[in-house]
Structure formats: C-alpha cells, structure tokens
Image (cartoon, rainbow, N blue to C red):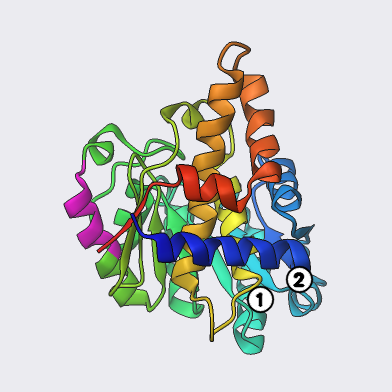
Amino acid sequence: MSREVIHQIIGMMEDIRAKKPLVHHITNYVTVNDCANIVLAIGASPIMADDIDEVETITSISSALVINIGTLNRRTIESMVAACKKANELGIPVVLDPVGAGASALRNETTERLLAEVKVTVLRGNMSEIRFTAGLEADTKGVEVSEADQKIGTDEGTQVAQNVARKFGCVVAITGPTDIITDGKRTIYIENGTKHMSNVTGTGCMCSSLVGAFCGVLDGERYSPLIAAAGGVLVMGLSGELAYEATKHLGYGSFRTGIIDAVSKMDGDTLIQKARVYES
C-alpha cells in the first residue's frame, strides 16, 4: 500500500475544496450534466463552453481543461484544438479523454490530431482507447472496452501505458479492473471500484472530470500530474464502490446518484481506510 501517494491525494483534495479551481470542459453532451455535478461534488467549479468564439477566453481564466471526444462534430473539433493550444500557451493542464478512439475514422483522426498538435498533461481512457493511441490494434466496442482488451493482463497493460506515456510525454491513466497510472517511470495501481460502474452512463467521463479537478490544483513543488491523475481515478473508483454498497438494493438510478453523493462526502479518513493503491 502506498501511503505516501494516498496522503498526497488527500492534500490535493483539500486544496480543491479550499481553492475551488475552475475546470473548463469541451465534452460530450450525453454526460455533460454528470461531469458538471461530479466536479461540483469534489469542490471545484465546472464551466462548459465549446463555441470557437469563446473557448480561448474561457480557457484562459480556467485552472484546467478537459477534452472529451464522446460526441464529436466538426464544429467542436476546431474549438478543442483552439482551447488546447491556448491552454498550452498559458501552462494550463490539459486532460484528454479519447472516448471511442478506434471506433470511427473521425474519432481516430481527431485523437491523432490532438496528440500531434497539443501537449497533453493526462491521457485517460480504457484499454481499447489507449491501445489505439499506442498504434496497436484495438477492437473498440462503441465507447466501451472490447472483450478482447478486457482480458489484457496488468503486465501487458502497464507496458502499453508506459510506452504511450513516453511517446507523448504525458501521464497515462488506463481505467479497468486494475487502474494503471504512469508517467513512463513511476507506475501506480489502484484496485478500487466495481464492475457495476459500467451499467450507468458517464462514469469514465466523470472520472476524467475529476482528474481535471485535481489537475486544477497542480503545484510543481508538491504535486505532480501523476498524483493528480491517480487522485481523480481513486476518488471515482472508491466512490463507485461505496455507492454500490449503499444502493445495490435500490437499482442503477440510485447508484448513479450515489456516486455523486460519495464524491461529495469523500474525506481523508475514508481514503486512508479504504484506498487500495500500490506503486512500482
């Protein structure tokens, strides 16, 4: 168990609630409300602006930028690129969630363009999506990880994540049965969560938004993007775990709400007692 990582995550969570960083999203309209609510629940402030005429202005007043390609269209692609370039210019962290990469030519081209033209801070996705960014064959099932990629072991997943992290100079977070978070040198594993999270829409998108909130309080002297990514992934997974225990007798609608409840109540004691975080 990595106590040091857990305590750093607790420190970042306390900073989020004290500083309330503004997290700008250009995200997918299926889950946009859930993303806003999860950011509020952790203590940050969400803003969603995707028109080309304001994305640079909104990005410039934000503490982090989250790009999610779940519901792509040609208009927002240009907004994504413009917002990311403004964020890079100002040193604002960028979180990229390549939802469904590998599933269509448009998603593939957009993912490749963003990774070529933009300096990404954290790349968060499922195994299929990250394998696509690695240039490997990925059998994406819509926006879900394929059955074949679900069977990829932790060792192979670690190698994929580390290679992508080194290739793009970013932190890579692969979420799955065991979450893998790496900057290419250090690798953190998280074993919190529940398989039932795949039965409600948007848990991956919400996870990326939480990573954005943690990136919003990055401090080079105390906190690294690796810890920020691990923080968002850990809080999401543990909240799903706690929410399912509290609502499993009610059903998935209550479970979805329970995740937001659990994030809003997350505290240091809970993380110390229940987080399953390891480092190699």
The percent coordinates of residue 129 (x first, y second) are: 38, 51
Quarter placement of the C terminus:
bottom left
Quarter placement of the N terminus:
bottom left
Tell me if mark 2 has few (under 14), some (14-19) or many (20+) residues whose alpha carbon lies within 10 angstroms of its own.
many
Residue at the limit of the structure toward the top, as seen here: 249
Tell me if mark 1 has few (under 14), some (14-19) or many (20+) residues whose alpha carbon lies within 10 angstroms of its own.
some
Measured along the vertical axis of the image, is residue 239 above or below residue 1? above
**Residue bounds of the magenta highlight:** 152-161
Residue type at the position of mark 1 = Ala
The percent coordinates of residue 256 (x first, y second) are: 64, 29
The percent coordinates of residue 186 (x first, y second) are: 30, 71
Answer with left or right where residue 203 lies relative to residue 107. right
- Sequence-first tag of 1 and 2: 2
The percent coordinates of residue 67 (x first, y second) are: 60, 61
The residue that label 2 is drawn on is: 55
Q: Nearer the viewer, residue 133 or 152?
A: 152
Give the SS element for disc 2. Answer: helix
Answer with left or right where residue 208 lies relative to residue 23. left
Answer with left or right where residue 15 lies relative to residue 45. left
For image coordinates 63% across by 53% down, the residue present is: 73
Give the SS element for disc 1. Answer: helix
The reply to whether callout 1 and callout 2 are in contact (CB within 8 Å) is: yes
What secondary structure predominates along the stretch shown in magenta?
helix
For image coordinates 66% across by 21% down, the residue present is: 253
Q: Nearer the viewer, residue 113 or 261?
A: 261
Tag on residue 82?
1
Residue type at the position of mark 2 = Val
